[in-house]
């Protein structure tokens, strides 16, 4: 197990700190496997858990963290719990409704960090039933609430003591700039897909210049995911450069991919429900890649995006972040 004290923290722009490695929970089934995964992660030294309202599995995360607390393994203040505002709760007064649902699901008094999951809103914002409200044509109903309004709601949640820090996810640089022009509380992080095939070097520089950290989701390229429809979805795990480095450092491919981000100052949240992988994914603090190796990994960039959210016509929405000529 990794000693949690050995897992570096990254300082955020509000003075708080976040552990550089966290456990991802998207698509972790709430059938007992996620409970075991979170318990295994805490035992392995993880203190940061990445959740979301939309993952529909937070109750199981909550059970695991509260049992770990009851067993004396950790205290709540040792943990860094992240969740994400869903897109049907963008109206300012409805943000708190979503935050309170997440707190109830996780059975915790506060979130360490609440992210806006995407910069686009869905539906009429009164329907708590459907995650993706669709019309008769089967396409998502576009919401008319600006992410700037949702951000005000998140700022309210900080002031109400429900969340300690707020951030964004899947925002492009144009959207970040616009948000910074209106925000009274700056986002601490932007959580986006990052791995060698989508190295995000430009966005990294852009965010660094504005004291916003990056958090890498799908750091292993999201292999095995039903949502990843790319034909070569496990190619990153077979990438010769990564294999060579794994051999050189006597590490596995996952560890090289995760260390790559941690060394770039990027927070990384690999998902696993396998206790062995959970343990191995945090054992990355006993080797160092050279600056040349970091550059070599960055140069593998091919704009490969495993997580396009390409369902229900979502990429056609006005504020879908990954297209050319985004209005804002
Ligand atoms: N903000 C967003 O919009 C957004 C989008 C996507 C993801 N996320 C967050 O980021 C987390 C991580 O991203 P992700 O789940 O998309 O993908 P990922 O962490 O890149 O990959 C997870 C997949 O890799 C497998 N795996 C885990 N460790 C491995 C290892 N060492 N070697 C080989 N395979 C390994 C897992 O299987 P097993 O479980 O069977 O081990 C799972 O199938 C998510 O869980 C979620 O918390 C956020």
Image (cartoon, grey):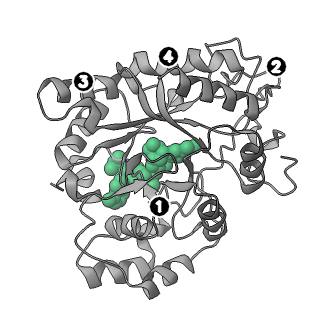
Query: CA separation, marks 4 and 1?
Result: 29 Å
Taking the image as shown, residue 171 lies to the left or right of residue 208, namely right
The percent coordinates of residue 186 (x first, y second) are 62, 44
Which residue is painted at 48% across and 54% down in the image?
Answer: 222
Distance of label 2 from label 3 (alpha carbons): 42 Å
Above/below status of 301 relative to 281: below
In the displayed structure, does residue 172 sit left or right of residue 117?
right
Numbered disc in front, either 2 or 4: 4
Q: Quadrant of residue 293?
A: bottom left
Image position of 203 with respect to 41: above or below: below
Does the rendering let one see residue 226?
Answer: no
* Residue ID for mark 3: 66
Query: Label 1 vs label 2: CA separation?
Result: 42 Å
User: Left of 219 or right of it: where is 246?
Assistant: left
Name of the residue lying farthest toward the left: 71
Q: Which residue is mark 2?
A: 136
Q: Residue at x 35, y 53 (%)?
A: 21
Disc 1 packing (10 Å; few <14; some 14–19; many ≥20):
many
Vertical side of 36 occupied by 46: above or below: below
Q: Which mark identifies residue 266?
A: 1
Query: Do tag 4 and tag 1 residues touch (Cβ < 8 Å)?
Result: no
- In the structure shown, which secondary structural element does the residue marked by tag 1 occupy? loop
First in sequence: mark 3 vs mark 1: 3
Residues at marks 3 and 4, CA–CA distance in whole angstroms: 17 Å
Q: Closest to the observer: 157 or 102?
A: 157
Q: Quadrant of residue 109?
A: top left
- The residue pinned by badge 4 equals 100
Q: Nearer the viewer, mark 1 or mark 2?
A: 1
The mark nearer the N terminus, 2 or 3, is: 3
């Amino acid at each position: 197990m990794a000693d949690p004290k050995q897992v570096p923290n990254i300082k955020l722009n509000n003075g708080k700190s976040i552990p550089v490695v966290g456990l991802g929970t998207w698509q972790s089934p709430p059938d007992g496997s996620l409970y075991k995964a979170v318990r295994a992660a805490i035992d392995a030294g993880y203190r940061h858990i990445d959740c979301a309202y939309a993952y529909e599995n937070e109750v199981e995360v909550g059970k695991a963290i509260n049992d770990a607390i009851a067993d004396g393994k950790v205290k709540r203040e040792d943990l860094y719990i992240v969740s994400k505002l869903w897109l049907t709760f963008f109206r300012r007064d409805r943000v708190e409704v979503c935050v309170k649902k997440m707190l109830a699901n996780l059975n915790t008094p506060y979130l360490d960090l609440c992210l806006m999951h995407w910069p686009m809103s869905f539906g009429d914002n009164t329907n708590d039933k459907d995650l993706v409200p669709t019309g008769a044509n089967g396409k998502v109903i576009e919401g008319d609430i600006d992410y700037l309004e949702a951000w005000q709601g998140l700022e309210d949640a900080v002031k109400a003591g429900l969340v300690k820090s707020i951030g964004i996810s899947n925002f492009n640089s144009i959207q970040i700039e616009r948000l910074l022009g209106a925000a009274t509380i700056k986002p601490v992080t932007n959580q986006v897909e990052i791995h060698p095939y989508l190295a995000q070097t430009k966005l990294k520089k852009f965010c660094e210049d504005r004291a916003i950290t990056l958090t890498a989701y799908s750091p292993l390229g999201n292999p095995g995911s039903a949502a990843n429809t790319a034909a070569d979805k496990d190619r990153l795990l077979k990438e010769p450069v990564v294999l060579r480095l794994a051999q050189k450092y006597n590490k596995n491919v996952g560890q090289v991919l995760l260390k790559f981000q941690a060394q770039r100052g990027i927070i990384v949240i690999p998902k696993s429900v396998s206790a062995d992988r959970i343990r191995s994914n945090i054992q990355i603090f006993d080797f160092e890649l050279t600056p040349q190796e970091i550059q070599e990994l960055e140069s593998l960039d091919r704009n490969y995006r495993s997580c396009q959210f390409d369902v229900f016509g979502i990429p056609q929405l006005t504020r879908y972040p990954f297209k050319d000529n985004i209005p804002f």
